Image (cartoon, rainbow, N blue to C red):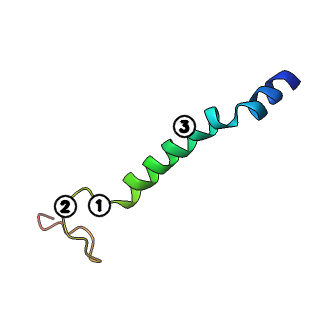
Amino acid sequence: MDSFLRFLGENKVWWITPLVLVLGLVAFLYFSDTSGSPQTDEGFQYDMY
């Protein structure tokens, strides 16, 4: 276990960078509106029911 922790300490860039990139991409997709429809406070309206 000590050698694994030493490996992580010596190679921080190689395991932190992909995590940061993936989290950044997920946050971007979560907060960006890709649907193209206007957002309203009313929510969904089901006229057929």
User: Which label number is shown at residue 33?
Assistant: 1
C-beta proximity under 8 Å, tags 2 and 1: yes
Residue 42 visible here: yes
- Which residue is at the front of the view, 6 or 49? 6
Estimate the spatial distance between the alpha carbons at disc 3 and disc 1, rounded to whole Å.
Answer: 24 Å
Q: Kindly identify the residue that appears in the image at 25 percent across and 71 percent down.
A: 39
User: Which label number is shown at residue 22?
Assistant: none
Estimate the spatial distance between the alpha carbons at disc 2 and disc 3, rounded to whole Å.
Answer: 29 Å
Residue 1 visible here: no
Residue density around tag 2, few if under 14, some if 14–19, many if 20 or more, within 10 Å: few
The three-letter code of the residue at mark 2 reads Gly
In this picture, is 36 found above or below 13?
below
- Which residue is at the front of the view, 16 or 47? 16
Residue 26's spot in the image, x, y percent?
A: 44, 48
In this picture, is 13 found above or below 23?
above
Q: Which residue is mark 3?
A: 18
In the rendered structure, the answer to whether residue 43 lies left or right of residue 23 reads left
Q: Earlier in the sequence, mark 3 or mark 1?
A: 3
